[in-house]
Image: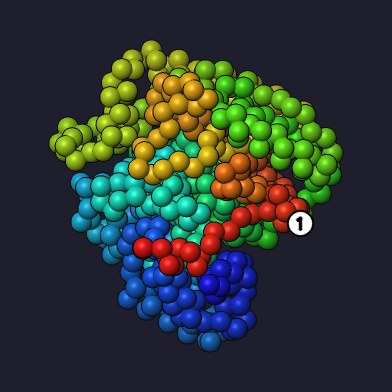
Amino acid sequence: MTSLSDRSAVDLRRLIGTKEISPVELLDDCLARIEAVNPTVNAVVALDIDGARTAAREAERQVLRGEPLGPLHGLPVGIKDLSETKGLRSTWGSLIFKDHIPTRDESTVAAVRAAGGIIFAKTNTPEFGAGANTRNAVYGATGNPFAPKLTPAGSSGGSAAALAAGMMPLATGSDMGGSLRTPAAYCGIVGFRPSPGLIPSDRRLLGYSPLSVDGPMGRSVADAALLLSAIAREDGTDPLSYPSNPRDFSPLPEVDLAGLKIAVSEDLGFALVDDDIRAIFHERCGLFADLFQSSIERDPQLGDADRTFAVLRAEGFEAGQRAMAEQHRELLQLPVRANLEQAQGFSLADHAKAHVEQTRLYRRFQALFQEVDLLICPTAAVSPFPHAEWHPTEINGRKLDHYFHWIALTYGLTLTGHPIVALPCGVDHKGLPFGIQIVGKRRGDAQVLAAALALERAFATRPKLARPKPDLAALGLAP
């Protein structure tokens, strides 16, 4: 089951520009793939077929007329259902908004359209992005393309699963505690958490908080970077926004990995990590260490990252969902309620301490990058689990204090504000996708992406490190 939709976004954009394929042809191919495999994984939850076909026909005419073409011209793009899309159902995965049809595009969606992307599909997400498991009461659960009864993680699980199954060449994601990176790891695709402010947002209520960011997702580093080149920009509506040059990201500069020094860490010095995942990571480090100038084992000093993140995370739920809980508590699902209940237990002193600790943590983190160019660690602490379970309850026999502690490997790095690439790195002990996080220097977005691209190319030549791909025929045949 191979088709245009399996080709890279970079390649498809080139073929559109040279008139070798039509945007209409590509859109129809993506829709056919969705029809074939989406019933199995439930990654795409809303479609605008008529609007997308109109846009694709106009994109085709623009090519034939020889008009200037944007970086995403004619490429179908999936939008995570935490973003408003004009005329296309946007629910945030909540029954409160199950019939919501926006009259506007939020800023990142508008940037995709302005770059020539064709907005045709919404991808599934947990309610308000809470809970790293993509299931909600509006659309149900999304399955992992490698094992549909398992979770693709969350909250960008719909985008990750759709990309892995070839339903679209590009998709948007967002990331607070790992919402983009963990699904990328579980589905064998690439996700990029950029520096806060590189991709501005007019959606974030806490505009000065660096925790939540939008980010690109693709099946390769170059594809994710192509989408980034279209949505990275300066926008005064976001107080953290700063100027950037799209040409920094597509094409990416060449990097000689042999000139780079790396640090590797199994658990960042504080996170609970399954023993089998530790063993897999240790093995993989041994398979790619020779690519670099040097490799050292080094845990960053992240202090009390668990409590710091819990408090800062609670601010977002207090700002965004408290009023809804007071009016519609019976409609809210477990993860949102759990976050709001936790938020009530924190005092002003707790918030002050958390902000101080995050600042100290950030400054300690800079010292590590005086010694190395990159930090590499696992993306997920456990192998994909059944989506019928909200979350893991223990790791290595130790009970988790809160439901989101299983994603400590990602939220610990969120607190640093550094750019991070989630890169596929073969399969784990269960034969499911395994991924690593590649952390770059402060605001070194282009540099860490370029290093990830070089690493991805090297991985492709080493069987145990190459990106895994799901059995699409099995997905199309499954009930």
Q: Quadrant of residue 127?
A: top left
Q: Quadrant of the C terminus?
A: bottom left
**Residue at image mark 1:** 461
Q: From the viewer's perspective, is 94 left or right of 164? A: left
**Residue at position x 67%, y 36% in the image:** 281
**Residue at position x 36%, y 27% in the image:** 314
Q: From the viewer's perspective, is 4 left or right of 56? A: right
Q: From the viewer's perspective, is 53 left or right of 381? A: left
Q: Residues within 10 Å of mark 1 (few under 14, many from 20)?
A: few
Q: From the viewer's perspective, is 122 left or right of 367? A: left
Q: Amino acid at mark 1?
A: Thr
Rendering colour mode: rainbow
**Residue at position x 26%, y 38% in the image:** 333
Mark 1 falls on what kind of element? loop
- Give the x, y percent position of residue 192: 56, 47
Question: Above or below — where is 479 with respect to 302?
Answer: below
Question: Above or below — where is 180 with respect to 88?
Answer: above
- Give the x, y percent position of residue 354: 46, 19
**Residue at position x 65%, y 24% in the image:** 300
- Give the x, y percent position of residue 46: 32, 62
One can see residue 422 in this view: no
